[in-house]
Image (cartoon, grey):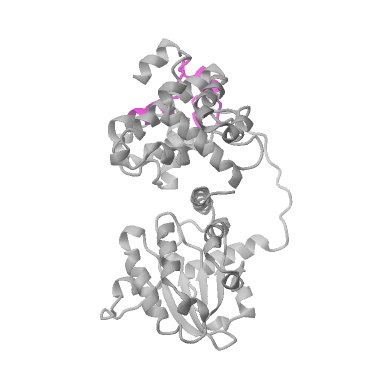
Amino acid sequence: MISTHDLEQLAEIELQKEEEEEEQGSSRGYPLAPSSGNACQDMSHPYYDVARHGILQVTGDDRYGRKLIIFSSCCMPPSHQLNHHRLLEYLKYTLDQYVESDYTVVYFHYGLRSSNKPSLRWLREAYREFDRKYKKNLKALYVVHPTNFIRIIWNIFKPLISHKFGKKLTYVNYLAELREHLNYDQLIIPPAVLRHDEELRAAQKGGPPPPVKIPPPRPPLPTQQFGVSLQYIREKNNGALIPPVICQTVSYLKRKGLKTEGIFRRSARVQLIKDIQKLYNQGKPVSFEQYSDVHVPAVILKTFLRELPEPLLTFTLYDQIQDFTKVESSLRASRCKRIVESLPEHNFIVVKYLICFLHMVSQESISNKMSSSNLACVFGVNLVWPPKGTISLGALAPLNIFTELLIEHYHTIFNSRCPPQQFSDMAV
């Protein structure tokens, strides 16, 4: 049984993936704000602070004469610029004017990002706030340009959603499909959504593209740090046991980030992370002081782990970790210790160094809100993954429990296998 917590974690991972793919795609750089003509200009509006963004539009009717209400994610500003409690009140204020009659909702998903999405707690609150009078007369909900994130969120809310309400949902992959159900010309569609739809359709024209001839991979630079093995990094860095990226990010975060609330949960600009990776790979110095943001080295550390050709805990141990929850709770720490001690020596040293640091972070959880459990949710998927395919929903729980034990019982699990003196000096 997949827990809600695991689904929430997977939703966050999927949203981050979508953001990274979008950053690399041709839609990068398009403004997501609505044109001023579509947003409320009446400063006397009781919810002008929310309405001015043009997130919600009421326009025309569908083919069955039902009022059409449009919600555009791309019009939502960053969360720190929008009071989500006010947003909920504004939604109810608007819907109250129409819910006594049948109505239809179109939700444009494109443009939802980590920076502007409401919390899942807010979504639950919103679902509870919209009681029967709102749900009864909602006759259709069209989700346009759905992604894996949307499908995961739907699974999270399935226990709360009636079968009858679930039948009202329709996924719409392309805007043209809306013509079957709505008076398309009456829709207010943000320019960013139109451009995104054009890109999706262009990618589909002519069927699947011809197979691309992939050139043989170029040998890594002697200074390469990302995307190469621990052994390669050690050989090219005078036998250093701890990769420079791990050493430098951990060192900085120990000094600057231990008490930072939400450390490792925030993101950073994709292009900035790529620029820093490039500096590392070219053997150029990196100074995190210049970025004045502890979340930058935190993201760099996670990125380094994620881009290793083989995970730090190795492919070999993946199945053992997946079977870990079959062990009786009282015996899990000792089982965890045996699994870790079976690692190759170099992997063991790096894992011990990293977990020692994460244990330090967890000790400051009163300030940073990052308990061993929260850290496990962030780092579990970056420490081990299957040799083929991606981590499934069912694989998250044992992975997170294993990682949490590593962090929580650091001194017990890592006390017997003694690393070389070089590492002992660094870990102090």
Residue sitting nearer the eye, 340 or 82? 340
Q: Residue 69 placed where, x, y %? A: 48, 78
Query: Looking at the image, which residue is at 57% across and 66% down?
Result: 197
In which quarter of the view is residue 29 placed?
bottom left
Segment tinted magenta in the rendering: 223-251
Horizontally, residue 314 falls left or right of residue 258, namely right
Query: Looking at the image, which residue is at 35% across and 72% down?
Result: 89
On-image quarter of the C terminus: top left
Residue sitting nearer the eye, 114 or 403? 403
Classify 267 as above or below 219.
below
- As drawn, the residue found furthest toward the top would be 421
In which quarter of the view is residue 339 placed?
top right
Query: Looking at the image, which residue is at 58% across and 56% down?
Result: 148
Horizontally, residue 83 falls left or right of residue 124, namely left
Classify 417 as above or below 286.
above
Classify 6 as above or below 314.
below
Q: Residue 45 placed where, x, y %? A: 29, 80
Q: Residue 351 placed where, x, y %? A: 48, 25
- As drawn, the residue found furthest toward the left would be 44
In which quarter of the view is residue 308 placed?
top right
| Magenta segment includes 229 | yes
| Magenta segment includes 319 | no
Q: Residue 307 placed where, x, y %? A: 53, 35
- As drawn, the residue found furthest toward the bottom would be 65
